Image: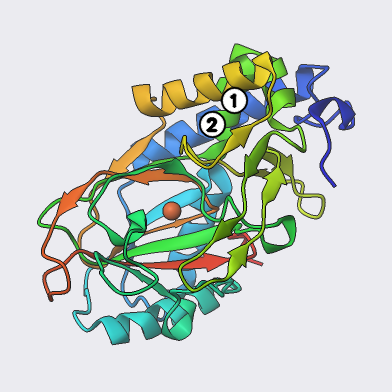
Amino acid sequence: MTQFGSEYADDSPWYTKGDGPYQAWRKRKLVQSNDTASASGPVEIRDLANPSVTEQAELVRRCNISNGALYACAKAEGDSEIVRDQLRGFADALGLRIAEKHRSAGRQGIVALTPSDKKGQRGYIPYSKKAINWHTDGYYNGSDERIRAMVLHCVHPADDGGINQVMDPEIAYIRLRDENPNYIDALMHPQAMTIPENREENANLRPVSIGPVFSVNADTGHLEMRYTARTRSIAWRDDPITRQAVAFLQGFLVGGDPYIQETKMQAGHGLLCNNSLHNRTGFDSKPDTDSARLMFRVRFHNRVSGD
Ligand SMILES: [Fe+2]
């Protein structure tokens, strides 16, 4: 069940009526995030299908601090079917439970994001060359189908463009709360964001999805975020503070923030994250050819935790 920030225990950083526990958490979070960002390039993975114990520990450590880790596998495999199997091994090694019942999921529950005119993909932005706005994955899913982690893995980069930006949702929370704690309460409202039902091309009906932007997982105590910057087929709760909060959030995502990471992934590179905010720029590459941009996406129900 969703809780408002004011309903958390007064020793929780998520409690919005007091400031002490939040300030302590915030300070630790920013120091650790800075240290991690400045000290490191991507985590080098020798064998994607079998990450070593040391490699796994470093991926988990970075995800614990900033909810995401870029990695680079020096030996990039060219055959995408082999990469599918490797990614499955990678996810299994990290204890991640593949979530995808997605209509476009292929073998191993992995979705191939590439420009496509295929039925069910034509007209959808992920399968085009267009830019994708800031979002977290599965923002239209019901609360029992939450996406808590994902991997974006580059099989073949675009000739030009296709740059991803990534932001830790906890940093977004900090930006909003520092500006106005009432923004947090507005975005934790159980009716903050509504995505209307949608009739998909295969005639399946995706039900309406109503829920908060920020919520705290009752089992893990971790902050989770559900967000899209889309402006069509979305209804924000109709009150001034919600509108201001959404405008402020959109403002720093588009305007830039020192904690936004930007990457143009090369073949064998990827992002493992706890469903961080992300976007992509538009790109140029020839559709349905071997040289088209091809990214694999795998979504998971559980977080990266190393357990
Ligand atoms: Fe996404």
| Model colouring | rainbow
Query: Which residue is depicted at the point 22% across and 84% down?
Result: 79
Q: Residue at x 30, y 74 (%)?
A: 118
Q: Quadrant of residue 21?
A: top right
The quadrant the C terminus occupies is bottom right
Residue located at (51% from left, 25% from top):
249
Are dots 1 and 2 in contact, CB under 8 Å? Answer: yes
Q: Is residue 86 left or right of residue 264?
A: right
What x and y, as percent, mark residue 156? 19, 67
Q: Relative to 282, does residue 156 appear above or below in the rendering?
A: below
Work out whether residue 10 or residue 247 is closer to the camera in this orientation and state it. 247
Q: How far apart, in angstroms, are the residues tagged by discs 1 and 2?
A: 5 Å
Compared across the picture, whether 126 is left or right of 197 comes to left
Q: Which of these two is toward me, 11 or 194?
A: 194
- Using residue 184 as the reference point, say whether residue 287 is left or right of it: left
Count of numbered circles in the view: 2
Asked whether 75 or 40 is in front, the reply is: 75
Q: Which residue is mark 1?
A: 174
* Residue 246 is at least partly visible in this image: yes
Q: Secondary structure at mark 1?
A: helix
Give the secondary structure at mark 2: helix
Neighbour tally class for label 1: few under 14, some 14-19, many 20 plus, Cα within 10 Å = some
> For mark 2, does the 10 Å Cα neighbourhood hold few (<14), some (14 to 19), or many (20 or more) residues?
some
* Circle 1: residue type: Ile
Q: Which residue is mark 2?
A: 171
Residue 52 versus residue 167 in the image, above or below:
below
Where is residue 222 drawn, in percent x and y?
70, 46
Q: Is residue 47 left or right of residue 253?
A: left
Residue 19 in the image: state x and y as whole percent: 76, 16
Q: Position of residue 279 (x, y in %)?
A: 37, 44
Q: Is mark 1 within 8 Å of ligand 1?
A: no
